[in-house]
Image (cartoon, rainbow, N blue to C red):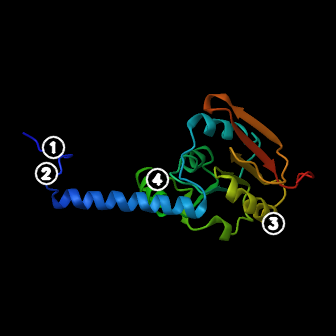
Amino acid sequence: MLPNPIDPATPLGLADLATLVVVMLAVANLLYYTVKTGVPPMPTRPVVRDAMFRLIPEDLAPNRIYDLGCGWGTLIFPLAKKFPDAKVIGIEVSPLPYLFCQIRRLAQPRSNLEIRYGDFNQKDLSDADLVVCYLMVRPMNPLSDKLGRDLKDDTIVISNSFALREWEAEEIEIVPESLSVWVYRYRVGNTDI
């Protein structure tokens, strides 16, 4: 008969204890970075990713694409596949999603994909042709200012769910299959920014 894992009289083995400690540390790490950044590592749903891709202008041939807060890689891997001639760079500050993306990159190699650890607010984005993000309200305000300073005219910015403060969207797509998520497309240099 197998021991009941819920029974407090059942002793934990060393492997069980090690697994429990690793899981608790992983959860604590995710919670810490969620509080620190104001952004939980939420993957972009496929229907929303498809909407984001539809908002990329068909005539755009980007050389450099950034995914700010790339999380688990739900955007950067498809972007690297869609744009094989572009350098696709994901930037992630939370260690677990960053590590997950690095492991995923080993399993799904893309020669044009790079994953960088760090705070995208501290990175130079001036060479971007396309920027994508799925963040939250708190980081969007400073990001609005940073992108306004860093990006060259005609750079496309596509944001899942959260608008850039004081920027006027060039186009918006509402995704009814995903609780009516709004996806915003901006173009730097638009006179309304």
**Residue picked out by circle 4:** 109
* x 83%, y 52%: residue: 167
Q: Quadrant of residue 24?
A: bottom left
Q: Amino acid at mark 4?
A: Pro
CA gap between label 1 and label 2 equals 7 Å
In the rendered image, the vertical position of residue 182 relative to residue 17, given as above or below: above
**Residue picked out by circle 1:** 4
Number of other residues with Cα within 10 Å of mark 2, as a class: few under 14, some 14 to 19, many 20 or more: few
Q: Quadrant of residue 48?
A: top right
CA gap between label 4 and label 3 equals 33 Å
Please tell me which of labels 1 and 4 falls first in the chain: 1
Please tell me which of labels 2 and 4 falls first in the chain: 2
Task: Indicate the position of residue 34 as horizontal and vertical percent values.
Answer: 54, 58
CA gap between label 1 and label 4 equals 42 Å
Number of other residues with Cα within 10 Å of mark 4, as a class: few under 14, some 14 to 19, many 20 or more: few
Q: Amino acid at mark 2?
A: Thr
At mark 3, the secondary structure is helix
Task: Indicate the position of residue 82 as horizontal and vertical percent values.
Answer: 61, 43
Image quarter where the N terminus lies is top left
At mark 4, the secondary structure is loop
CA gap between label 3 and label 2 equals 60 Å
* x 80%, y 48%: residue: 186
**Residue picked out by circle 3:** 149
